[in-house]
Structures are given as C-alpha cells and as structure tokens.
Amino acid sequence: MRNLFKLLWTGAMVYALCCIVYACSEEEDCSMVDNRGMIVCNFLTIDPNTGLAGKDTIDSLTVTAVGTDSVIINRMAEVSSITLPLRYTADSTEFIFRYTARLTDTLVIRHTNTPYFVSMDCGYQMKQSITGTRYTQRYLDSLYVSNPETSINGTENIQLFY
C-alpha cells in the first residue's frame, strides 16, 4: 500500500511539474508568418541545335516595381535566377526589367491574394497564386509558369526564356 501511495504521489508531482514547465514555455513561433512568399524566376535559353532548354545568364539586370519607388534588383551582374515579391494590395504586379539604358521588358503578373488565419498570436498570412501573365518581347522571348503557388522555400515559379 505504501508503494502505491509513493507511486501516486510521484506521478502527481511529475504531472504538476510538467504543467508548470509547459505554462512557462515561449509564445508560439511566428517566424513562418514573417517570411513572405516570393516568386522565383529562372533564366533559360533554348539551344537551336538540340531544342533543349538550358540555364542562361543576363549580363546586367535592374528590376523595378511599377507604382513604387523600389528598386528590387540594381544592376546585378551575371544573373541566372531572381526572386520577386507580389503585391498584397492588388491583384496584379508589374515589373520592369532593364537590361541596358535603352532595352527594357515589362512583366505583368496577375495573381490572387487569399488571406488565411494562422493563430491568435501570429495573425494572418497571405497565400498568393499566379493566374496569368503578360509581357513585352524586346529581349525576353517567352515565359512559362511552372508553379503558380508562391512559397518561402525557393521553388521555381516562372521560367523566362531569352
């Protein structure tokens, strides 16, 4: 009987200690909320001999977002991939790709913005999905949307062919 009482007493103390430790634990980790989903664009070229796509690099690239004073990429050299944000407040985002002083292309990405509730501590996050594209073809030849869902893990969304 004494062993049963000691076992119950020990179990109650361990349970109380676990409750105290859990109650004093940190708040919910909201680091995933702070990370914004972005689109990843890879630059490709088609080999005229084989017809296969391969990695391409742009000698110099500046990317700006229309309607803002932001320069997203400023004269970056030897560019083979870029990451771009989409607007939360509109259903389209327009980028200007400047290759030289006189050579530019415009890329318009239409997308949906769907807010979803994460938690009371972390609030809302935005899911964004590409619904369409429009672009000029001064230097850019074509594009392909390989994955319409934005993410924080660097998954390719758009292939830009030059």
Image: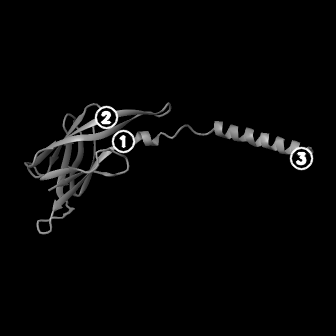
Instruction: Provide residue 88's location: percent of width, then percent of height.
Output: 30, 34
Q: Residue at x 9, y 49 (%)?
A: 137
Q: Which color scheme does this rendered protein use?
A: one colour
Q: Residue at x 11, y 65 (%)?
A: 48
Q: Amino acid at mark 1?
A: Arg
Q: Decide: marks 3, 1 in contact (CB < 8 A)?
A: no
Q: Amino acid at mark 2?
A: Asn
The disc at residue 113 is 2
Around disc 2, counting alpha carbons within 10 Å, would you say few (fewer than 14), some (14 to 19), or many (20 or more)? some
Q: Amino acid at mark 3?
A: Asn
Instruction: Provide residue 69's location: percent of width, then percent of height.
Output: 22, 36
* Nearer to us: label 3 or label 1: 3
**Location of mark 3 (residue):** 3
**Placement of the C terminus among the 4 image quadrants:** bottom left
Q: Secondary structure at mark 3?
A: helix
Return the disc, 2 or 1, that comes first in the chain's sequence: 1
Q: Residue at x 21, y 56 (%)?
A: 43
**Residue at the bottom extreme of this rendering:** 49
- The foreground one among 75 and 127 is 127
**Location of mark 1 (residue):** 36
Q: How many marks?
A: 3
The disc at residue 28 is none
The quadrant in which residue 7 appears is top right
- The foreground one among 31 and 45 is 45
